[in-house]
C-alpha cells in the first residue's frame, strides 16, 4: 500500500499499531459478541448477560475494556446504566470480518466482490 502524500513513516507505523490494537480488542469472542449485541441499540448489563449467556462479572470486565478503548459508551437511565456503541462505523469492521470468513470458508478462490482492490 502506498503512503499518502504527506504521511511520514512514523505516522504510518502509529496507524498500524492502532489498527493492530483494534484487532486485538475485537479478537476476544466475548467483546466481539458485545459489539454485535449492541448493534440494534443500547442495553443494560443484565440484558447483555442474558443475550450472551455470560456472567455479569465477565460482561462488566469486557465492557470496561471496550469503554477504555473508546468503542462503547455508558449512559445512566434512571436506575440502570445503558451501554451503546460510540461509533456505528465499528459495525462495518465486524461486517467485513464476517464476510471475509464466509468467503474464506467457501474456498476463497475468487476475489470477493467487496474487495478493496
Image: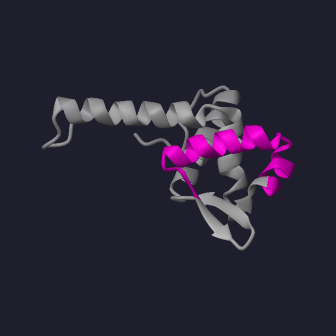
Which residue occupies the extreme left position in the image? 6
Q: Quadrant of the C terminus?
A: top left
Apparent side of residue 83 relative to residue 111 in the rendered image (left or right): right
In magenta stretch: residue 61 = yes
Image quarter where the N terminus lies is: top left
Instruction: Point out residue 67 in the picture as x, y percentages from the top left corner.
Output: 55, 49
Residue 96 seen from this side: no
Q: Position of residue 74 (x, y in %)?
A: 60, 60
Rendered location of residue 99, percent (x, y):
63, 41
What is the basis of the colouring in this image? Answer: one colour
Residue at 53%, 50% (x, y): give it: 71
Of helix, strand and loop, which mostly describes the magenta segment?
A: helix
Total count of labels: 0
- Image location of residue 102, percent across then percent down: 68, 36
Residue range (magenta) = 46-73
Residue occupying the point 86% across, 43% down: 53
Residue drawn at x 74%, y 65% as measured from the top left: 80
Using residue 55 as the reference point, say whether residue 20 is left or right of it: left
**Seen from this angle, which residue lies furthest bottom?**
78
Relative to 74, residue 93 above or below:
above
When asked about the image quadrant of residue 52, the answer is: top right
- Left/right placement of residue 110 relative to residue 29 reads left
Q: Quadrant of residue 58?
A: top right
Amino acid at each position: 500500500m502506498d503512503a499518502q502524500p504527506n504521511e511520514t513513516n512514523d505516522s504510518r507505523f502509529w496507524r498500524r499499531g492502532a489498527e493492530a490494537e483494534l484487532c486485538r480488542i475485537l479478537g476476544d469472542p466475548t467483546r466481539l459478541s458485545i459489539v454485535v449485541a449492541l448493534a440494534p441499540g443500547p442495553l443494560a448489563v443484565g440484558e447483555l448477560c442474558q443475550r450472551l449467556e455470560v456472567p455479569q462479572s465477565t460482561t462488566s470486565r469486557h465492557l470496561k475494556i471496550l469503554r477504555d478503548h473508546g468503542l462503547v459508551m455508558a449512559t445512566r437511565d434512571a436506575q440502570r446504566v445503558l451501554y451503546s456503541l460510540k461509533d456505528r462505523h465499528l459495525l462495518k469492521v465486524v461486517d467485513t470480518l464476517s464476510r471475509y470468513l464466509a468467503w474464506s470458508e467457501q474456498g476463497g478462490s475468487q476475489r470477493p466482490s467487496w474487495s478493496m482492490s
